[in-house]
Image (cartoon, grey):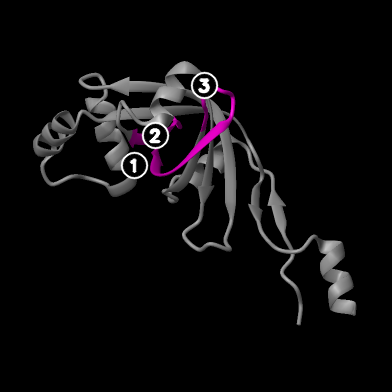
Amino acid sequence: MARTVSTNTTVDRDGMLDFVRPRHRMLVATTRADGRPQMSPVSGGVDDLGRIVISTYPGRAKTRNAERRSAASVLVLSDDWNDAWIQVDGDAEVLHMPEAADALVDYYRSISGEHPDWQEYRAAMAIQNKSLLRITPTRWSPISTGGFPADVAARLDGA
């Protein structure tokens, strides 16, 4: 039986954004005060300016960390566990209410499309005191898939 061979496909900024836009399962990594990484599973989208957007709360570790140090990384996963992924590194900014209101609308649209009642949505975001992480990509990995390195797969298939 042929082995699955890992792949790495280098993409430009547009290719990276095309890959990320339909995928909303992400892990965001920020840096704790002691220098160690802090990771959180999140839902995210891409706004009209090509920034990764993530809804959060002011007191969450990822929010506090991004306010202290803007460097952040996002691992964007496909819906199927063994499918492709990409790591996007960038600079994070944090928006809090009420400044975050319009950006939270953009966040919602990037994931779910139009809301049936934007006034209701904005009110809910205000009541919840939501915040938004907005990460401007500065570099990214190739789009990758798991599997064996090609030379290992060939040796295993020949065995």
| Residue 48 to residue 19: above or below | above
Residue 113 spot, x, y in % from top left:
26, 46
Identified at 66% across, 44% down, the residue is 142
Q: Which mark is residue 110?
A: 1
Identified at 18% across, 33% down, the residue is 128
Circle 2 sits on which residue?
53
Residue 13 spot, x, y in % from top left:
58, 35
Q: CA distance from mark 3 to mark 1?
A: 31 Å
**Mark 1 touches mark 2? (CB < 8 Å):** yes
Circle 3 sits on which residue?
33
Query: Along the polypeptide, which appears first: circle 2 or circle 3?
Result: 3
Q: Which mark is residue 2?
A: none
State the SS at label 3.
Answer: loop
Identified at 39% across, 34% down, the residue is 53
Chain part drawn in magenta: 30-55
| Amino acid at the residue labelled 3 | Ala
**Mark 3 touches mark 1? (CB < 8 Å):** no
Query: Along the polypeptide, which appears first: circle 1 or circle 2?
Result: 2
Query: Along the polypeptide, which appears first: circle 3 or circle 1?
Result: 3
State the SS at label 1.
Answer: helix
Q: CA distance from mark 1 to mark 2?
A: 9 Å
| Amino acid at the residue labelled 2 | Val
